[in-house]
């Protein structure tokens, strides 16, 4: 990613005043300074694709009238002639201006322009001596004056947060940044197509909920004045999506925002995008195969290969992917013995020996997951499905038939990060109520991430939810992976930041 220096440029700054003075002079000269009637006929990349293959004489013979609109990104002036580059949503094109072609008034307007101004220009194409496809301007209009100087691209980044705070400048001067977000849009479109082709129905469920549930997370609280009731921004759509399974929508998905009132890091933003999907008459094993198909489809369309670079590692997405139980992950990657992961005492002893930052007083299942996250998670570079999760950390998942202390669940890890979480769904209302009661005890003991009891959800299960499996995939982390971005802030257009002081 190109480094840029973003200078907030005080209103009294000399360059800002010079540009404002130019704008006043243009108004005084009768120029319409903010018109809205210029219609471009081409984009920069459209010009290149349509005419780039023509020979010089064919360009002259074609004599197409090209009308282009965009932002001036560079100017090279030679007295009575000049070159400048216009950047639009699809790329950049060089423009050549001559005083004898534009006339006195047109060339005077050009001389009042600055890097950053938005212009409309029209003319014919030719190639320069260096063979660069160029538009020779026959006319020029100022569409919007840029009153602040653009960042000086080659002078380095003074403030790492400046790009996120002024994303509009970041997008303007860094093509690599635009490419990340264009790729994000392609991935989201692909996700929708992937599930629609498999007969899934896209739905929308409430963002504000009377009872937060579906994930172990601390919610944001708001208040509805008319109803005089507290509401919560959703931490997950899970319980509403499974109500739809009860109602007969056997395959549903939602691509939307979740909100969690928790920490901010390179992996976490309080507002984030999640894909959740649920399939009746399926198990978590079915979703393992579906997840492999999904990642292969994204890699094929977006990357064009089953191998890609992420964080300096070469990742191979060719299925089938590795599977490990969470205990195997701790012994294989953490150096633990089988006896260490077999009991609370064993985990406590192992954690003390390794000096791990875990809660030694946690129940067995919680402690196992904490140890896994400390010693194994970051080492799971190649695609790995981690299974065998304890019941204690999975209040909405179906118990395993062979070992009811475990649930039928997997988490997908690639590049040392969790990208997906899925399980066979618990559809026994009595079991679900009991799990909610256990979660309530945790809340009463001070765990504000535990799920409160949702009586209506239990009532829905009493009407009968078909056996099913569901999965959640964090879109921001997914895009991080497929764009090799180190921080979640690099793939969210406007991430949450502390106020500037």
Image (cartoon, rainbow, N blue to C red):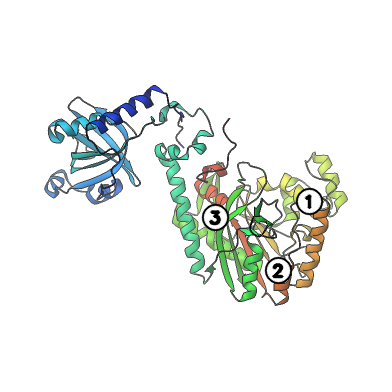
Q: Quadrant of residue 4?
A: top left
User: Image check: 405 left or right of 179?
Assistant: right
Q: What's the residue at 46%, 32% (across, down)?
A: 3
Give residue 413's position: percent from left, percent from top. 63, 52
Q: Is residue 342 above or below residue 180?
A: below
Q: Residue at x 79, y 40 (%)?
A: 354
Q: Name which quarter of the figure residue 253 lies in.
A: bottom right
Q: Which residue is mark 2?
A: 457
Choose mark 1 or mark 3, whichever is in front: 1
Relative horizontal placement of residue 246, taking residue 350 as reference (left or right): left
In the image, which is nearer the foreground, mark 3 or mark 2?
Answer: 2
Task: Report the Cα–Cα distance between label 1 and label 3.
Answer: 38 Å
Crowding around mark 1 (Cα neighbors within 10 Å: few <14, some 14 to 19, many 20+) is some
Circle 3 residue: 317
CB-based contact (under 8 Å), mark 2 and mark 1: no
Above or below for 133 versus 283: above
x and y, in percent, of residue 78 in the image: 21, 25
Q: Which residue is mark 1?
A: 447
> Going from the N terminus, do you reach mark 1 or mark 3 first?
3
Q: Answer yes or no: do the residues labelled 3 and 2 have beta carbons within 8 Å?
A: no
Q: CA distance from mark 2 to mark 1?
A: 21 Å
Q: Upstream in the sequence, badge 2 or badge 1?
A: 1
From this view, report whether residue 392 is shown above or below residue 244.
Answer: above
Residues 179 and 35: in front is 35
The spot of residue 392 in percent (x, y) is 79, 58
């Amino acid at each position: 990613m190109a480094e840029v220096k973003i200078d907030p440029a005080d209103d009294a700054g000399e360059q800002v005043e010079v540009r404002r003075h130019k704008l006043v002079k243009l108004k005084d000269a009768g120029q319409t300074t903010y018109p809205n009637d210029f219609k471009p006929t081409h984009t920069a990349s459209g010009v290149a694709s349509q005419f780039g293959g023509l020979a010089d004489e064919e360009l002259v013979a074609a004599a197409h009238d090209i009308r282009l609109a965009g932002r001036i990104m560079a100017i090279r002036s030679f007295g009575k002639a000049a070159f400048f580059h216009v950047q639009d949503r699809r790329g950049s094109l060089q423009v050549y201006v001559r005083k004898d072609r534009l006339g006195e008034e047109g060339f005077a307007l050009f001389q009042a322009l600055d890097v950053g101004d938005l212009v409309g220009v029209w003319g014919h194409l030719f190639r320069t001596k260096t063979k660069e496809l160029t538009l020779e301007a026959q006319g020029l209009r100022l569409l919007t004056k840029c009153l602040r100087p653009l960042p000086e691209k080659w002078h380095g980044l003074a403030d790492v947060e400046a790009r996120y705070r002024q994303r509009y400048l970041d997008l303007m001067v860094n093509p690599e940044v635009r490419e990340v977000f264009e790729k994000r849009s392609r991935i989201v479109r692909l996700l929708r197509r992937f599930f629609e082709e498999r007969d899934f129905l896209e739905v929308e469920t409430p963002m504000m909920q009377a009872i937060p549930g579906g994930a172990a997370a601390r919610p944001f609280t708001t208040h509805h004045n008319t109803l005089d009731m507290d509401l919560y921004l959703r931490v997950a759509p899970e319980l509403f999506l499974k109500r739809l399974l009860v109602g007969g929508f056997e395959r549903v998905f939602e691509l939307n925002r979740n909100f969690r009132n928790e920490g901010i890091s390179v992996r976490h933003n309080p507002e984030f995008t999640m894909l959740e999907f649920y399939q009746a008459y399926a198990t978590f094993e079915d979703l393992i195969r579906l997840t492999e198909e999904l990642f292969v489809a994204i890699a094929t369309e977006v990357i064009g290969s089953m191998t890609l670079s992420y964080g300096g590692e070469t990742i191979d997405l060719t299925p089938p992917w590795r599977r490990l139980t969470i205990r195997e992950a701790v012994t294989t990657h953490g150096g633990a013995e089988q006896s260490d992961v077999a009991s609370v005492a064993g985990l406590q002893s192992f954690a003390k020996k390794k000096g791990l930052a875990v809660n030694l007083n946690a129940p067995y299942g919680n402690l196992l997951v904490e140890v896994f996250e400390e010693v194994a998670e970051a080492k799971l570079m190649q695609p790995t499905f981690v299974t065998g999760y304890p019941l204690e950390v999975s209040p909405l998942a179906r118990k395993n038939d062979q070992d009811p202390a475990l649930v039928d669940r997997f988490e997908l890890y690639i590049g040392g990060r969790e990208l997906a979480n899925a399980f066979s769904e618990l559809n026994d209302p009595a079991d679900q109520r009991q799990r909610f009661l256990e979660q309530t005890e945790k809340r009463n003991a001070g765990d504000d991430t535990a799920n409160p009891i949702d009586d209506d959800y239990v009532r829905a299960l009493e009407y009968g939810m078909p056996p099913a499996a569901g999965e959640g995939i964090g879109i921001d982390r997914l895009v991080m992976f497929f764009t090799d971005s180190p921080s979640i802030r690099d793939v969210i257009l406007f991430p949450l930041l502390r106020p500037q002081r």
